[in-house]
Image (cartoon, helix red, strand yellow):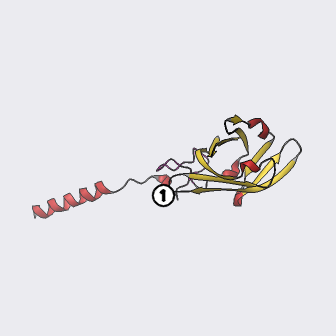
């Protein structure tokens, strides 16, 4: 009888010790709200499904081929809305431009896609690799020799 109790105790301890601890962020479909940095605790990459439409964004930095061109984009305010609709307000002439945005996840990185049909913004078009994503403050992106930072306004 003692032998069976010992075996049962060892099995119980072994099974309990092998169970993975559950992270509440993973349980809730791997998403967090805008209350904090929206990153997946497992890999540190952005979480898809984050409510991007809670704020407007401006370009805080745009560098291409080592040249800082941020000033050229200060006249734009970006809103990444629902259903992947991006609205860009050109502040100097009171014009609204629409486009498309998306976030996706690859096996080793997360991506942010921009597609807007406007000559002044066309060089932002493409799929950018996300370096930093904090829905409360900033999004840092890179594509080739270009770096782009959106800041929440």
Q: Is residue 63 left or right of residue 110?
A: right
Q: What percent of the width, then of the height, locates residue 104? A: 59, 57
Q: Is residue 68 left or right of residue 24?
A: right
**Extreme residue in the front direction:** 65
Res 136 visible: no
Q: What percent of the width, then of the height, locates residue 22? A: 42, 54
Q: Quadrant of residue 35?
A: top right
Q: What percent of the width, then of the height, locates residue 117? A: 79, 55
SS category of the residue bearing label 1: helix
Look at the picture and state if 136 lies above or below 50: above
Look at the picture and state if 43 lies above or below 75: below
Density class for disc 1 (Cα within 10 Å; few <14, some 14-19, many ≥20) is: few
**Extreme residue in the right direction:** 93
Q: Is residue 119 left or right of residue 81?
A: right
Residue located at (60% from left, 53% from top): 111
Query: How many badges with numbers are in the image?
Result: 1
Residue located at (77% from left, 40% from top): 73
Q: In front: 35, or 91?
A: 91
Q: In front: 58, or 53?
A: 58
Residue located at (78% from left, 52% from top): 87
Q: Quadrant of residue 101?
A: bottom right
Q: What percent of the width, then of the height, locates residue 5? A: 15, 61
Res 11 visible: yes
- Residue segment shown in magenta: 28-47
Q: Main secondary structure of the magenta part?
A: loop
Q: In front: 10, or 68?
A: 68
Is 80 included in the stretch rendered in magenta?
no
Q: Badge 1 is on which residue?
A: 27
């Amino acid at each position: 009888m003692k032998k069976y109790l010992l075996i049962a105790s060892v099995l119980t301890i072994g099974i309990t010790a092998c169970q993975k601890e559950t992270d509440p962020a993973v349980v809730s479909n791997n998403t967090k709200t805008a209350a904090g940095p929206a990153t997946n605790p497992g890999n540190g990459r952005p979480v898809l499904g984050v409510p991007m439409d809670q704020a407007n964004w401006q370009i805080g930095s745009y560098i291409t081929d080592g040249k800082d061109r941020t000033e050229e984009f200060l006249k734009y305010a970006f809103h990444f809305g629902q259903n992947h609709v991006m609205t860009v307000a050109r502040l100097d002439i009171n014009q609204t431009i629409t486009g498309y945005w998306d976030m996706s996840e690859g096996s080793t990185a997360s991506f942010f896609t921009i597609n807007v049909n406007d000559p002044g913004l066309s060089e932002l078009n493409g799929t950018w690799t996300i370096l930093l994503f904090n829905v409360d403050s900033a999004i840092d992106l890179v594509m080739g020799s270009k770096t782009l930072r959106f800041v929440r306004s």
